[in-house]
Amino acid sequence: MFLIRFSINNPLLTNMLLVIVLIMGVLSWKAMPQEMFPSVELDKVRISTVFEGATPEEVDRQVTLPIEEEFDGVADIDVITSVSQEGVSTVLIEVKPGTNVDEFLNDARDRIGRITDLPELAEDPEVVRLEARFPVISVALYGEIARGELYEQAEQVKRKLLQIPGVAGVGVAGDREWELWAVVDPEQLAARKIPLATVINALRNNLNDTPGGSIKSVEGDILLRGKGAQPDVEGLAAISLRTNARGGQLLLGDIAHIELRLEEAKTLGRFNGKPSVNLTITKTADASTIEVANRVRVLTTQLEDELPESLHVGLFSDLSVYVRTRLNTVKSSGLVGLVLVLLSLYLFLNFRVALITALGIPVSFLFAIVLIQYFDYTINMVSLFAFLIALGMIVDDAIIVTENVYRHMEEG
């Protein structure tokens, strides 16, 4: 009652507030991110550390355990889960309900900074709060070309995608790194009476002081750790295996074929029946799904003209299609509701009352948009579905309330 009485007694101020709501609503709508689903921040913190080439045992002993010990006994922690893989340590911390995760995140970064016994060759640990965020669109780079060239082109495309405003990250599936291979000839080993252990020791003594990959044999993989220079094809071939009394040397290149190869495939991608590398784009929190997808489409059109003729670009998993469809549904439903209110009130009352009532629909929506942006929410499938539900209530209530007011006006 207070709001109604205030509006009647202060018509000028009420109209000014109405105009302000309309302007702020339009500006908020244009500024708000539009996405498929709302991003959900989880009560989990992930600590990832890259220790390139290290064995799982080395990763666990030198990286994972020191990090776990640093968080031992912290009151806000519920569960700590860790995974030590070849070259990567991942520690997942789940905090107790009610904990301020942002404060815990800052404290976790401080604790990581105080760890002094991590390996020098390990990268700095990355501490992030986990979010449930969905990809925006995926790009497939495909064609009948050499795998090596395909992966090199994919890296160039990835760099261009990361330069698009609103793109937070680009995940790559189907790519492979280059590896240095020494394929030893067993017949040469037997003829020169050189045991495989001699080759292994020579590699360990001449590689850089890092994990040096592995040797594949019938017994399994033999992991290496070097102590010398960073290898290349020429350097690896020049490693000395044996020196005779006259100063002659037997080099690794004499008994092995040294070459660069692509690493063994962990994932294989195909698009339209052709080999592909797939790039999945995720957006920043403040970016619009539709705008990011449109920018990616523009870039892919440009790439078709820049890439070799045998290489093509395809798009799939475009979530902006669903967001755009739901937005159009809300707009069309709002327009239908507006027309229904106008017609029903115009037929049974008069046009002035119908017009005033119909204006309440866009005003209500724009005011809701202002509140959504104020509370840092986004336009997504969930909020749009809520708009659709509210639309029916607004139309029904507008007709009932207006008819009741009009009846009281006629009664005097």
Image (tube, rainbow, N blue to C red):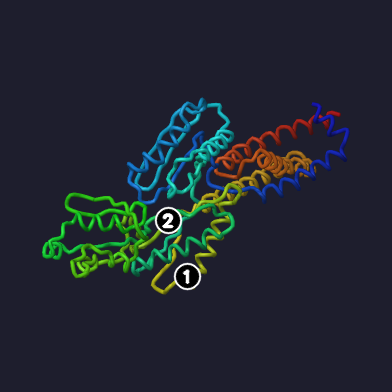
From this view, report whether residue 310 is shown above or below residue 56: below
- Measured as percent of width and height from the top left, residue 189 is found at 15, 62
Name the residue type under label 1: Glu
Q: Quadrant of residue 245?
A: bottom left
Q: Tell me: 235 left or right of 381.
A: left
Give the mark nearest the N terminus, 2 or 1. Answer: 2
Kind of element beneath mark 2: strand
Q: Which mark is residue 391?
A: none
**Secondary structure of residue under mark 1:** helix
Report the quarter where the C terminus lies: top right
Q: Say which quadrant the N terminus sits in.
A: top right
**398 left or right of 37 in image:** right
In the image, residue 80 above or below residue 28: above
365 or 47, which lies in front? 47
**Residue 304, numbered circle:** 1
Which mark is drawn over residue 172? 2
